[in-house]
């Protein structure tokens, strides 16, 4: 899809409001971030353009598709707090999403159940059953190595690498390893951009870009990026907000990396199943 084609399609408005209760010791800014993300999620989930996907996908797949749209394709997002008292923050959001980008993500979640070949359907069913179980031979599990987070100024962070490890551990299709040379997949997290702009006397905007470079999925390195704009009040703790957003983007990137690694490992299982049918 060309950039021009994406521009020519008329954007779809997103509007929603929701409230979130503060957790013990949680700052108002953190509650607001959660409330905004939840509102954007609900706004996208209610779009009539996604009705067919809601019917054909299970709940997990449908929610994963919505999160993909939330993280990468919502444009001109604005939010305002409508209530902040008694440990509750309520927000109202508005934004836009391009229908071409919806179609792009929909294509990533297409099912492969349209074949008319009965034998293929039988094999696919057997493979799907196998994939609901953990691999029988742990020695054959893939190995994943996670590097330290690299900042754009050359610094590195073991702290955020450990955060990624905590989010990606205990997976039935791979082990995390401390030996890069042995790994089937090598993940390099990168902090590419963190910029704060003052919008007016009381509001600021944070833009952050995070990328996970994944080696092992294909012949070349695959980059999974998260780019987010966030509005916040000038009296809020800028460093705290940045840290929380960084963790959120890393977690979203990790979820996508896990999904792609699992897909690759499932393809291997499918190939083995097809081989046994011959």
Image (cartoon, rainbow, N blue to C red):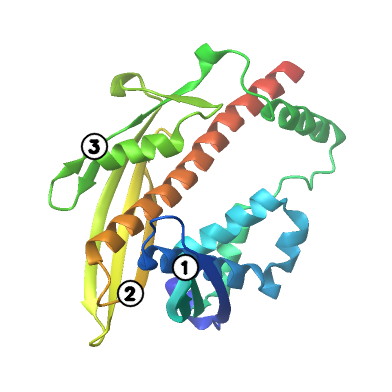
Instruction: Tell me the crowding category of disc 1: few under 14, some 14 to 19, or many 20 or more residues within 10 angstroms, Cα based.
Output: some
Residue at 64% across, 67% down? 45
Q: Residue at x 56, y 66 (%)?
A: 41
Q: Quadrant of the C terminus?
A: top right
Spot occupied by residue 177 in the image (x, y as percentages of width and height): 36, 22
Dot 1 or dot 2, earlier in sequence: 1
Q: Is residue 153 left or right of residue 198?
A: left
Q: Check disc 3 and report the residue beneath it.
A: 158
Please tell me whether mark 2 or mark 3 is closer to you in this view: 2
Q: Residues within 10 Å of mark 3 (few under 14, many from 20)?
A: few
- Residue hosting label 2: 232
Of the residues under marks 2 and 3, which one precedes in the sequence?
Answer: 3
The relative height of residue 48 versus residue 225 in the rendered view (above or below) is: below
Q: Is residue 192 left or right of residue 173?
A: left
Mark found first going from the N terminus, 3 or 1: 1
> Mark 1 sits on what residue?
87
- Residue 211 higher or lower than 2, as above or below: above
Q: Residue at x 58, y 26 (%)?
A: 268
Q: Position of residue 143 (x, y in %)?
A: 42, 23
Neighbourhood count class around disc 2 (C-alpha, 10 Å): few under 14, some 14–19, many 20 upward:
many
Name the mark nearer the viewer: 1 or 2. Answer: 1
């Amino acid at each position: 899809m060309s950039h021009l084609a994406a521009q020519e399609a008329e954007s779809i408005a997103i509007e929603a409001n929701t409230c979130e209760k503060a957790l013990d010791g949680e700052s108002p800014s953190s509650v607001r971030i959660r409330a905004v993300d939840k509102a954007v999620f609900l706004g996208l989930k209610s779009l009539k353009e996604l009705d067919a996907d809601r019917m054909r996908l299970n709940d997990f797949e449908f929610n994963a598709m919505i999160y993909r749209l939330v993280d990468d394709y919502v444009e001109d997002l604005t939010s305002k707090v409508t209530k902040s008292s008694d440990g509750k923050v309520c927000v109202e959001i508005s934004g836009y999403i391009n229908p071409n980008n919806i179609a792009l993500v929909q294509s990533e979640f297409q099912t492969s159940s349209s074949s008319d070949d009965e034998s293929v359907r039988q094999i696919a069913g057997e493979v799907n059953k196998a994939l609901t179980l953990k691999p029988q031979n742990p020695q054959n599990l893939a190995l994943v190595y996670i590097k330290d987070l690299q900042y754009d100024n050359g610094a590195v962070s073991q702290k955020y690498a450990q955060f990624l490890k905590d989010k990606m551990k205990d997976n039935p299709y791979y082990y995390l390893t401390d030996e890069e040379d042995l790994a089937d997949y090598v993940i390099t997290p990168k902090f590419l951009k963190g910029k704060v702009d003052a919008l007016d006397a009381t509001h600021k905007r944070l833009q952050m870009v995070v990328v996970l470079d994944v080696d092992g999925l294909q012949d070349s390195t695959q980059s999974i990026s998260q780019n987010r704009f966030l509005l916040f009040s000038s009296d809020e703790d800028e460093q705290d907000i940045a840290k929380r957003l960084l963790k959120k983007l890393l977690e979203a990137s990790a979820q996508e990396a896990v999904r792609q690694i699992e897909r690759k490992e499932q393809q291997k299982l499918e190939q083995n199943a097809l081989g046994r049918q011959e």
